[in-house]
Image: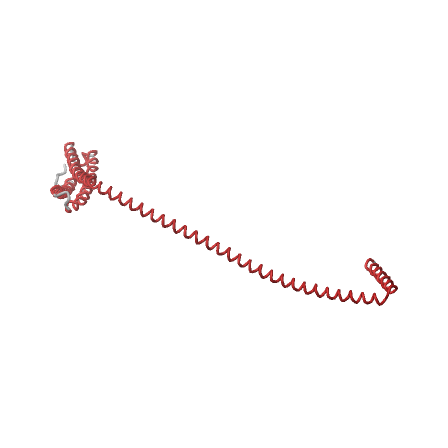
Amino acid sequence: MTSPSQDPFYLVKDDIQASLDKAQAKFTRWQNLSKTSAERKRLEPDIDEECKSIAWQVDEMEKAVDVAEKNMQRFGLNPQEITNRRKWVYGTRRQIEGMMNSIESARHIATRLTEPSNAAAKLGAAASQENDRFITSEADRQQLLLRQQDDELDHLGEHVARIGHIGLQIHEELEQQGDLLDELDEDVEGTQTRLAQAQKKMNSVLQRAGLKGQICIIVFLMVTLVILVMLAFS
């Protein structure tokens, strides 16, 4: 059987025990401090980390004990030694769990004590956020209405500009139509004047020609008309 001084289990056990004693000293110091002490809050994460590290090492030691129990003759062990090693594993684990549970319980108590103030702070923050959200939404709505009004005014301005342009075109068209009517009136007056002059000349010729002359002129005109019609349809 391997002596304790040469057995790797006891070498590692001594290292773990040293770490456990160090964590236990910090834990005792933590217990004696005031709950509002800054040092107490500073020690909590240190103790927690050391306990987790020791717990991992103890788990590895338990795995080694399981292997040794299956091969006791190979390692020179007996059932009593295995039992002693398991007792050490379980006892060490309970110490670690006791320190971690105490720290975790203290944290829960501190959290519950601060919950009312936290709830009030959260309620106030929620109300403030809601007010800010309402103000922001109202401002956005006002900005949207202003933009819509600006767009409508822009469209109205475009319509007015188009109507004004159409009015100018209508005015120019009316002026052109007026000029054309004036030219037509001048042409009509000129034509009426020429017709009046031609009628006067015709009356003068008819008066000079007498009855026989008028009949000759009528016959001449009829013959000319017949010839023109024949030429047009030939």
Query: Would you identify the image quadrant in which residue 51 lies?
Result: top left
Viewer can see residue 41:
yes
Query: Would you identify the image quadrant in which residue 4 lies?
Result: top left
**Left or right: where does residue 156 sit relative to residue 207?**
left
Viewer can see residue 57:
no
Query: Would you identify the image quadrant in which residue 167 lies?
Result: bottom right
**Left or right: where does residue 86 sit relative to residue 224?**
left
Along the viewing direction, whichever of 182 and 40 lies nearer the viewer = 182
**Residue 181 position in % (x across, y down):** 65, 62
* Residue under the image location 62 percent in, 62 percent down: 178
**Residue 52 position in % (x across, y down):** 20, 42
**Left or right: where does residue 180 sit relative to residue 130?**
right
Along the viewing direction, whichever of 92 and 133 lies nearer the viewer = 133
**Residue 189 position in % (x across, y down):** 70, 64
**Residue 202 position in % (x across, y down):** 80, 65
Along the viewing direction, whichever of 39 and 153 lies nearer the viewer = 153
